[in-house]
Image: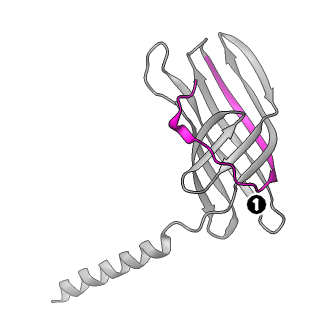
Amino acid sequence: MGRMRSVAALAVFAAGFALVAGPAFAFDINGTWAGKISCKGIFDGEPQTLTLLPTLLIDDTGELQLAVDGVHYAGLAFPDPAHPDKGQLAIVRCGTSSTRSSDAFGGEFGRLKVSTKPSKGTGSLSGATYRASVLLATSVYTCKWSFKRMTTDHPTLAGCSTPQPN
């Protein structure tokens, strides 16, 4: 009987821990963001530096989706339990593939830090992504992202349902 109580107590503890350690309410990052993506890498065997000034759209209702001037990403939010207006995002560019063929390997993934101020409707996003492609020419880049939220308008994004170039 003592062993049965121990198992029952462990089950109650585990269930309680799962409720406490479960995902916290995610921060609101919907909106239009303006900023810069700076990339350094190799394109067709030659060093290359690129700087882009794109518009970033984020739709965080349901599945987290991002679009940078028409290039779509899927994401996963990791809110900071101690600071619910801050957290991190893991993102993967739609169409990313690990298939090692002459035209399929490539894509992009990354980690971004987010800080928002809901009362003001502002926020900042920064981090890095890593990109590789063999589509037009072999290339590999490290890209630094830096954005500020311009609006909290909710864009509706198509997500990864449409094919994306590497």
| 93 relative to 5, above or below | above
Going 67% across and 47% down the picture, which residue do you hit? Answer: 112
Crowding near pointer 1: few (<14 within 10 Å), some, many (20+)? many
Residue 16 screen position, x and y as percent? 41, 79
Going 66% across and 70% down the picture, which residue do you hit? Answer: 82
Going 46% across and 27% down the picture, which residue do you hit? Answer: 98
Residue 101 screen position, x and y as percent? 44, 16
Three-letter amino acid code at disc 1? Answer: Thr
Q: Which image quarter holds the N terminus?
A: bottom left
Indicate yes or no whether the magenta region holds residue 145.
yes
Indicate yes or no whether the magenta region holds residue 122.
no
User: Closest to the observer: 60 or 80?
Assistant: 60
Going 56% across and 68% down the picture, which residue do you hit? Answer: 24
Residue with the mark numbered 1 = 116
| 110 relative to 5, above or below | above
Q: Residue furthest bottom?
A: 1
Q: Quadrant of residue 3?
A: bottom left
| 112 relative to 19, above or below | above
**Left or right: 163 in relation to 148:** left
User: Closest to the observer: 88 or 153?
Assistant: 153
SS at circle 1: strand
Q: Quadrant of residue 66?
A: top right
Q: Quadrant of residue 36?
A: top right
| Count of numbered circles on the image | 1
User: Closest to the observer: 58 or 14?
Assistant: 58
Q: Which image quarter holds the C terminus?
A: top right
Give the magenta range: 139-166
Q: Residue furthest left?
A: 1
Residue 11 screen position, x and y as percent? 30, 78
